[in-house]
Amino acid sequence: MKVALIGDVHANLPALEAVLNHAHEQGVEAIWNVGDFVGYGAFPDEVVRRLKQEEALSIVGNYDSKVLRFKKKQKQWRKKKRLEKYLAFMWAYKNLSKKSRKYLRFLSKEMRIKVKGRRVLLTHGSPKSSEEHLAPDTPDEYLRELAQIAQADVIICGHSHRPFVRQVDGVWFINTGSVGRPDDGDPRACYAILEIDSESIQVQHYRLEYDVERAVAATISGGCAKVTLRVWLYFYFFFLPFFFLPFFFLPFLPFLPFLFLSFLPFLAMSSFPFVSLAVPLIGGSDGL
């Protein structure tokens, strides 16, 4: 059986299309996807729909799960998450259709498949956690521990965005690499082809050029950059003035109580209109 192993597409449709076209040219019989459909790229809904159309066997990734929780967690994450991650979650959530969200919610965190008598486990991170990174330099001793947990002959994962193939005590560990956001120094799209039968297992990774200009242009024109701009405008026009305000009023400090009392009636009547102007800069249909 010949299978395309993909993962960590991260809403990069041009990269996914290059991978799928190449995989079909190689004559693959199935596509197995270890999750993280969305995040960072400009095509979250298109990626979900395309993989559904391909009838890929998919599991949910940690980014997918977080995007689905965005509406409930947005206030908490706005304070705790790094700006680029927060924006990635917000963009993906707002640009996923209800149908795609529903599809992602029903995906499992792992999947077990039996092929030619061999037990295969699909997991996003590791058999322990969807957020654990397995890398080319993960110690053999730790992989042995994971093999005991997994109880599988082949363990296929992603998440670290670093492709590798390792065999420890007869158990195969395959990291697909990242289709849409590689993190191993090679920016090309990455995926693997697995050939598996009762006699042997063969794995080969491929690196593919794709239309980067299209991906970047879509990020800018589609709104990802606009979302970032809106947040920074909110910061510069709402928070930053308050930082410098004390320095501005320093020479007038002795007269400040009198100035405040003079302007109090006007402030009460206006109800601070600048707040209503600033908040929509990060606002949206979901009340952000």
Image (cartoon, grey):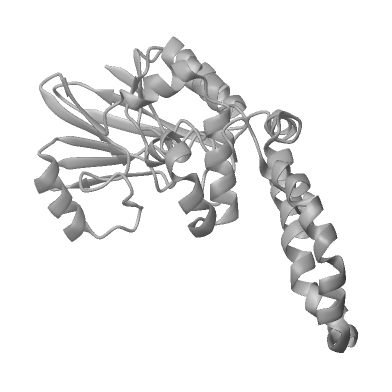
How many labels, in total?
0
Quadrant hosting residue 63: top left
* Residue in the foreground of this view, choosing between 166 and 287: 287
User: Is 273 left or right of 106, judged from the image as shown?
Assistant: right
Residue in the image at 50% along x and 16% along y: 50
Res 26 seen here: no
Residue in the image at 35% along x and 26% along y: 105
Res 35 seen here: yes
User: Is 163 left or right of 143, judged from the image as shown?
Assistant: right
* Residue in the foreground of this view, choosing between 144 and 256: 256
Image position of 70 with respect to 85: above or below: above
* Residue in the foreground of this view, choosing between 218 and 268: 268
Residue 43 on image: x %, y %: 59, 27
Q: Residue furthest right?
A: 251
Residue 69 on image: x %, y %: 41, 38
Residue 156 on image: x %, y %: 28, 36
Residue 219 on image: x %, y %: 69, 34
Point out the image quarter for the N terminus. Answer: top left
Residue in the image at 89% along x and 84% along y: 252
Residue in the image at 63% along x and 29% along y: 210
Point out the image quarter for the C terminus. Answer: top right
